[in-house]
Image (cartoon, helix red, strand yellow):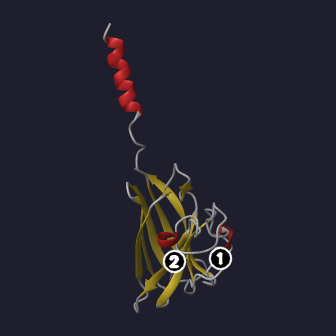
Amino acid sequence: MTRPWIVIGIVCVLGSQPAAAENATAVIAGTEDGSSVTGTAIFGDTPDGLHVVIQVSGVSPGQHGFHIHQYGRCEDAGKAAGGHYNPEGVKHGLLPTDGFTQAHAGDFGNIDIRGDGAGTLELILPGLRVSGGDYTVGGRAVVLHEQVDDFGQPTGNAGGRIGCGVIAITGE
């Protein structure tokens, strides 16, 4: 008579396990023929939010806007990626400080590029996930812009798209 209760208890415990964390990678390439822009963006779900590490090279020194765009396509010099990922239809901002009510879900701000043409940006973004949430990045594209994101409206005035990569889910 106790066996069904044991089975029910096991089912309840197994059913309450958290979803597995996922990872994703975008390989960034220049949007124009002969471009030297290369890089990667690595995404991983953590208990604190989406951990993002972006590394690029072959870029002119200074600050360059970096965003997640709506579609996972990089054709047409990156224009096929569409606009910034903005599921809430809010104004442009800086997601890490402004949150989802005051910034696009894809607004990562700027990446600083050193004199040698390389740069790294690392962020933890609460609320974003690789997949399985309200704000998911898997299957979208990352875009590196030619100029600094000045946080002006509607998209930060960061200019053309010089690098692009599709965010591919790689599993756990």
| Three-letter code for the amino acid on which mark 2 is drawn | Gly
Of residues 96 and 68, the one nearer the viewer is 96
Mark linked to residue 77: 1
What residue is shown at x 51% (from left), y 58% (from top)? Answer: 168
Placement of 34 over or under 164, stated as above or below? below
Residue drawn 52% across the image and 70% down it = 95
Residue 154's x, y, as percent?
A: 67, 77
From this view, report whether residue 63 is shown above or below residue 48. below
Judge the density around disc 2: few (<14), some (14-19), many (≥20) Cα neighbours within 10 Å. Answer: many
Indicate the position of residue 96 as horizontal and vertical percent values.
Answer: 47, 70
Task: Tell which circle, 2 or 1, labels the residue nearer the N-terminal end.
Answer: 1
Q: Residues within 10 Å of mark 1 (few under 14, many from 20)?
A: some
Q: Residue at x 51, y 52 (%)?
A: 131
Disc 2 from disc 1: Cα separation: 21 Å
In terms of image quadrants, where is residue 41? Answer: bottom left
Viewer-proximal residue, 45 or 60?
Answer: 45
Tell me which amino acid carries mark 1. Answer: Ala
Q: Which mark is residue 109?
A: 2
x and y, in percent, of residue 153 in the image: 66, 80
Residue 15 x/y as whole percent: 41, 32
Q: Is residue 101 left or right of residue 46?
A: right
Tag 2 secondary structure: strand
Q: Among all residues in the image, which is located at the extreme top?
A: 1
